[in-house]
Amino acid sequence: MISDKVKLTAKDILEKEFKSGMRGYKPEDVDKFLDLIIKDYETFHQEIEDLQQENLRLKKQAEGAAKQRSAAPQQQTGTTNFDILKRLSNLEKHVFGNKLYD
């Protein structure tokens, strides 16, 4: 899971306290930027969760399709090109009549 690799959570960022020093950054600017980062983290987390759910759904769908294919009857063995050409010839006769062979 991705959550094992992520070191910070939105809550960690929100609760982070910075010491102020001489000539430091404006706390308001830092807070605004951290708020943007928190929103991105929440968005990324939701997107990852959605993609993981979709991934599971697609895997199940693929497994179902694979099972369906293996359960489907295999194509007739012994059908040759001659048989196919004969069927095609008969179909042409039926559709176009004897005009083709006159």
Image: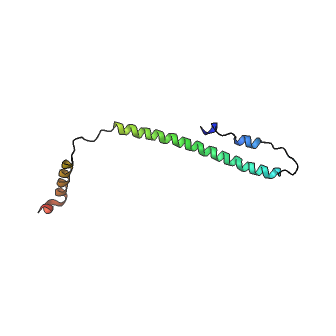
> Quick one: which residue is furthest to the front in this view?
22
Frontmost residue, 98 versus 24: 24
Task: Residue 11: name its quadrant.
Answer: top right
In percent of width and height, residue 3 lies at: 63, 38
* The N terminus, quarter of image: top right
Q: Does 12 sit left or right of 56 as displayed?
A: right
- Does 23 sit above or below residue 45? below
> Quick one: which residue is furthest to the right in this view?
22
In percent of width and height, residue 73 lies at: 30, 38
* The C terminus, quarter of image: bottom left
Q: Does 32 sit left or right of 88 as displayed?
A: right
Task: Say which residue appears at 19% left-offset and 57% top-offset.
Answer: 92
In percent of width and height, residue 66 lies at: 40, 39
Task: Say which residue appears at 43% left-offset and 38% top-offset.
Answer: 63
In percent of width and height, residue 47 lies at: 60, 46
- Image color mode: rainbow
Task: Say which residue appears at 54% left-offset and 41% top-offset.
Answer: 53
- How many numbered circles does the render carry? 0
Q: Does 26 sit left or right of 78 as displayed?
A: right
Task: Say which residue appears at 17% left-offset and 54% top-offset.
Answer: 89
Frontmost residue, 87 versus 24: 24
